[in-house]
Amino acid sequence: MVGLIACLEKPLFARLLYSLCFGAGCMLQVYVAFFRPEIYQNFAEYSLIPIYKTFILEWMPRHTPEFILAVATLQLWVGLSIWGKGWFFKGGVLAGIVLLVLLLPLGLGGAFPATLNMALGLRILMKREAGSYLWPVISKEYSKTKSYAMR
């Protein structure tokens, strides 16, 4: 819920948070894919849809690194696109929304309801923030020096 409020009230801050979340998620996915791939099997018990459970238990054990690296690449693209504008920003944010919506059937294993809130927040940002790059706006916004009149 805080993320939704940030998207409405402080969209620059929200974009930074989303970029950080997707970037950290990418790094975590890469680590787990190579060093602890068995962790993903645990998500099957939280699945709300039988096809997700079947996918996790039957297909994923044979292809975990490939699948998770694809997801991590998508997360990296979303995290980087949040810094952009126009079609690059919108495409990345749309990919992030799709990724988060695809996690919803995992229920608590997919961090529900946080994934729903994040998807809604990205939708808000896509509508409001596609017209400007993030880095020049941040540098202008946060590097303003206050000048004091000499008395």
Image (cartoon, grey):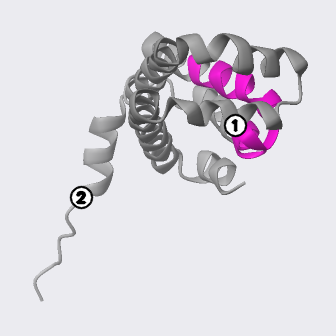
What's the residue at 33%, 40% (across, down)?
137
Q: Position of residue 130 (x, y in %)?
A: 50, 24
What's the residue at 52%, 31% (across, down)?
129
What's the residue at 69%, 37% (across, down)?
42
What's the residue at 81%, 37% (across, down)?
46
Mark 2 crowd level (few <14, some 14–19, many ≥20, 10 Å Cα): few
The range drawn in magenta is 95-117
Residue 144 is tagged as 2
Let me know if residue 62 is in the magenta part: no
Q: Earlier in the sequence, mark 1 or mark 2?
A: 1
Which residue in the protein does label 1 denote? 42
Q: Position of residue 119 (x, y in %)?
A: 69, 33
Is 131 or 115 nearer to us in this picture?
Answer: 115
Is residue 124 found left or right of 14 in the rendered image?
right
Which of the 4 image quarters holds residue 84?
Answer: top left
Q: Position of residue 54 (x, y in %)?
A: 80, 15
